[in-house]
Amino acid sequence: MPAVFLATTNSGLDWQVDQLIRSDIKENDIVIWGGSFPISFSWFIDSKLYNIWPYWNEFIDDEQFHSKKELLSTMLEDESRIKLSIRHMAQVISFCKKLKVKLVIAYYPIDREVQEFKDFVKTTPYYLELPKVVDLAADRSHPGPITHALYAKRIQEYIENNLKVKS
């Protein structure tokens, strides 16, 4: 099955929605949207894009960026961010329905889950909860190769059983 990836490291839900809506997906395409939403989001400082996520402080070495540390940390689970994330998710669901695209929302649970968002995603017919992380990648914060193999197997089974597509 051919694949196109619209991903970038630690991208926020807002960035992901932008990429999906501007992509050239068409009827009967399968969109597998994976992540631990809505924790991550985009932030610009002097026109430079930063992807804010729970462990960003350990990886970004930029003095100007760190001056916003307290503000950005509080925004990770701010009510407005959660509500916007739910709105973004609803926009993609609506967009995919209109195009008759097969959408799979592959969600992996993390230690900083936002229950209101997860409750919303679980009500969609596109929800697929992935297994818990069993190993970590080299950055020590993302799922590792064993976990990704489990994810791939689960997604493939979901597509074959629910979308009636054989790989």
Image (tube, helix red, strand yellow):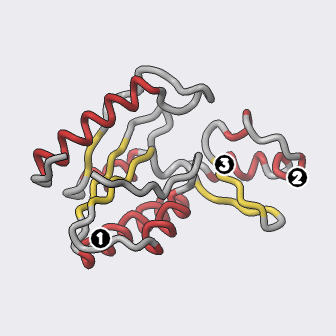
Where does the image place residue 133, in percent across and percent down from the top left?
Answer: 41, 26
Report if the CB atoms under discs 1 and 3 are less than 8 Å apart: no
**Label 3 SS:** helix
Picture disc at residue 74: 3
Q: Is residue 116 visible?
A: no
- Mark 2 or mark 3, which has the lower sequence index? 2
- Asked whether, in this view, residue 56 is left or right of residue 141, the answer is right
Which quadrant of the view contains residue 115?
A: top left
**Label 2 SS:** helix
Camera-side mark, 1 or 3: 1
Name the residue tied to disc 1. 96
- Mark 1 or mark 2, which has the lower sequence index? 2
Q: Type of residue at label 1?
A: Cys
Crowding near the residue tagged with mark 3, few <14, some 14–19, many ≥20 C-alpha atoms within 10 Å: few
Picture disc at residue 64: 2
Between 73 and 65, the one nearer to me in the picture:
65
Residue at 88% x, 52% y is 64
